[in-house]
Structures are given as C-alpha cells and as structure tokens.
Amino acid sequence: MFEPEVNPEGIKKAEFVVAIPSYNEADSIAFPVQQADRGIASFLGNRNSVIINCDNNSDDGTKEIFLGIRTAAPKIYISTEPGVKGKGRNFRNLFEKVVDLEAEAVVVVDADLKSITPKWIKHLGEPLFQDFGFVAPLYVRHKYDGTITNSIAYPLTRALYGRRVRQPIGGDFGFRGELAKVYLHSDTWSEAVANFGIDIWMSTLAMNENVAICQAFMGRPKIHRAKDPGSDLGPMFRQVVGTIFDMMREFYPFWSQVKWSKPTSIFGFGLGETEMPPPVEVNTATLFQKFQEGFKHCSHLWERILHKETLNKLQEVGKMDRDLFDFPTHLWINVLIDFAIGYRDAVVEVDELLDSLIPIYLAKTLSYVKKTERMSIRESEEFIEEECVQFEATKSLLLQRWNEGTGGRS
Amino acid sequence: MAKILVVDDEEHIRLLYSEELTEAGYEVITAADGYKLIERIETEKPDLVILDIKMVDYNGLDLLQEVRNKFYDLPVILCTAYDTFKEDIKSIAADFYVIKSFDLTELKKKIATALEAHIPSS
C-alpha cells in the first residue's frame, strides 16, 4: 500500500534537516545516509536533526533500504504519488516538510554520491547557522565532468545575476529554512523545475532574493555517476537550459541592472590534501558527428533562431575538420543569446528549440575538450574563468538584442 | 571619489600605488600590515581594498577570508609577486588578482571594473 510519508519516530519539529532526493537508488543510498548521520553526530550533535529521503516512490526497494539503515538521527521517508516522477517534485515535498518541521537549515546531498564524507554535512550546514542563506558546493571536478555547468549554467548565471557560484547545479547544497517558503510560493514553478531544472531554479531564486551565498569547499571531488558529455542528454539538457531561459524572462528587471560579477565567501578549509577526481572519458568522434548531424536535422530551426551573423559563423565552423576544430567563445555566447531570445519569443516550439541547441553545445564541448586536452584541472579552471569574463563583457550585446525584441534574426 | 585601502608590507609598493592611484583620481589610504584590518575597514569605510598576499606576519588569503565574511560585497583585489597562489582555493573569494608590476595599467582596469560591479537589491 502506498504511504506518502513514513515517520517512524513521529518527528514533529527539527532544527536541522539532511535531505536525500532519490529515484531507484536502492544500490547507492545507504552510503550518503550513513555519512550524513556521522556528519550530524560529529558536527551538529547539539541540534535536533532529521534525515529525510524524498523519493519518487521507487520500486527497487529504496524506501526499505533507507528506513532499514541504523542511524542515530531519526529518519523520515516522504514520496510523491505512484507514477509521479521528477527530482523537483521530490523537492517540493521536501519544502513542505521543512516548513512543517520549522527547520532552520537544510542540507541536500545526492543519493548516488560515492565520495561524501561527514565533513560535507558540516561545511554545507554550518554557514546556515551563521550569516548565510544559501550554500553551494565547491569541489574539484574532472575538467570533462559537468560540461553543462562549465559551458552554460556557470557562465550564464554569473553574467546574468552577478554572483560567482561555480556549481549552481551541483546537486549538493544547503539553504535556510525560510527559503523553503520562498520556493513554495514562487510563481516560477514549471514542469522543467519539477524535474532536473530544480537545482538551477533554486540557485537562481536565491540569487534574485539577494540571499547571502557562500561556497563550501568539499575537499573530496564529487564522485558519482558521471556521464560522457556526448551521451544521451535530452531531457536533462532541456530541463536545465529551459529553466535558465525561463528565469531570464522572469528576472529581467533584476539581471538587466547587474554589472560584472562579485565573488562569494568560501567556507570549509582544513580538509587536508585535496583528492583528484577520477577521469571522465569523452568520445570526441561522437561529439563531432552529432554536430555534423545537427546541420542535417536542425538547420531549418537554426535559420529561425539565430541572428544572421551567428548563423554564418556557425556554418563556417561546421566546415572545419575534426583535427583543427575550434568553436570560438564569442560565437558560443552569441548562440546562447540568440537561443535565449528565440526561446522567449517562442520562434519555434520550445522543446524543438532546446533540442536543436544540443548539437551546437556538443560542438562547443568538443572545442573545450581539445583546448584543455593538455591542461591541468587548475589551468582548465582558469580557461573557464576567462570565458566567464567574455560572457560578462558581452552582456551589453545581450541587453541590446533582448530589448530589440526579435533579436534581429535572419 | 572612491577610497582605496592598500595593504602591503613593502613601502615602495605603498608609495607607488598611492601616487599612481591618487593621480588616477582615487583617494588612497595605506596599511603596512593586516593588523586590525577589519577595524580599519569599519572606521575608514574604503570602497575597495588592494591586498598583498604575502606579508611578513600576515597571510593575505586568510585576511581576505576575514574581510569577505564581514564585508560581503566589498571589492578586494589580491596582489602578488607570483601566480602560484592561484592554486589556493581561498583566492577565489577575491574580486580579481593581479601580478605586481610597476606598470599599473592592469591594476587600474581591475579597480575600475570592481568599482563598477553592481548587483541591485531585490
């Protein structure tokens, strides 16, 4: 029988919540739960705490595994209705529960984490009891892990909202309990947010609320099920990028006033030697092939979405050999500007529009992989930082085109 | 006129920055170390801080952390003779970093950008 909530200890109030969203994570959820429990005991033992698994009614036994783990902190299991899926929907249940529990602070960690330590709970949680309202993670990631973050989410949110948050869709973060009410009452909720758009939505709302944000250094890299950036991206890409574009439309009055960017505070040092992340394999042949296929399948859409100069430049890049391939940063910025405006104006159906961005994004990823091939992680970070400065410097063009209305498409 | 606090333990750097930045139209105040830096900022209310990373008795990166936690949006530019400090993750809490040079063109550019940066209140 379906139970929307299992609360074995009848917990009614909690100061501190560690939440673990899941869908069919029976094989992996035990480890983050155990680490979270140790983190609570070691660093937040004086707070009334609870561990919540917010689940999509998994049918692989996630619930039974979660409830069966022996922990010092009490546990609550909450679930969406049978058949109702989506990471964001798990979060919506969480927000309601957080308000219900009158929690002061919430830390969320992914259920597939293999590298979480108890200190992650401390570093994501402690700043929330000081002056910070939102804590984003800062971990060393392999240069090819998180390419949507590196090419789109980080540079765009930084240029738009002015806050340098390196992992705005990191999946592991903290927020103050009051923010749960803001999230619940926001009228920007959408189907994309109800799914994988939730992380960027939460980060962006926090920035727009002018909440004090800090980045917590995790020490260990994020080790989870990293994907080859050329593998099937479809729904996740659409939901994350669609949410970014939705928020651009919604928060224009805010971001149009933002000039350049400001850093955030960093929390959580003294973790000893930083561990290097495992390698991520990238199939550059697939990236190149998918970009080339994009010309066959998406040209008719690109002609309606892209500014004439952008389209011409893209066609030039399309003629390059794989060995000499280069996708200039300024072209990528112009592509994103045109797509954001095309999305706002619904020049083509939005799912088609977002899908047609994927081959171009893969081309940008291929170029990034080639340019950073011989770079260390630190050097590749500097490369991304330089790209971010170009994004910020091009903001006047974005504003000009945004205010022109149609963006001057060909 | 924007007020800039230069924190550097080398006297010739303080003098150079004072002269050049005053000429560029800024009001410049200086400190030879990080002693009571937070109190100094509270009293003097600078619009921007230029912070040396390696001072005899002070680590600029630790000072940056203190400043950032207390003054969330106060622009801070880190200055150093070497670029190895970039390996330290603490450096990302700075608005910018520059390699020390007698040519202050780059520094002036960063100062202008940092002072221009603006995030509206919601």
Image: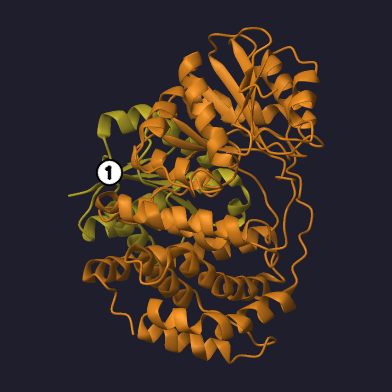
Chain colours: A orange, B yellow
Q: Nearer the viewer, residue A372 or A352?
A: A352
Asked which secondary structure carries label 1, the reply is loop
Q: Residue sitting at 67 percent across and 60 percent down?
A: A143
Residue A387: percent from left, percent from top: 49, 66
**Residue B37 visible in the shown view:** no
Q: Position of residue A183 (x, y in %)?
A: 41, 33
- Residue A41 drawn at (x, y percent): 70, 15
Position of the N terminus of chain A, as image quadrant, is top right
Residue B26 drawn above or below residue A123: below
Residue B78 lies, with reference to residue A388, above or below; the image says above
Q: The disc labelled 1 sits on which kind of residue?
A: Asp
Q: Nearer the viewer, residue B52 or A21?
A: A21
Vertical position of residue A141 compared to residue A1: above or below? below
Residue for point 29% across, 58% down: B112
Q: Position of residue B90 (x, y in %)?
A: 56, 43
Task: Determine the residue located farthest toward the front in the rendered image.
Answer: A1
* Residue B85 showing in the rendered view: yes
- Residue at image point 49% right, 58% down: A241
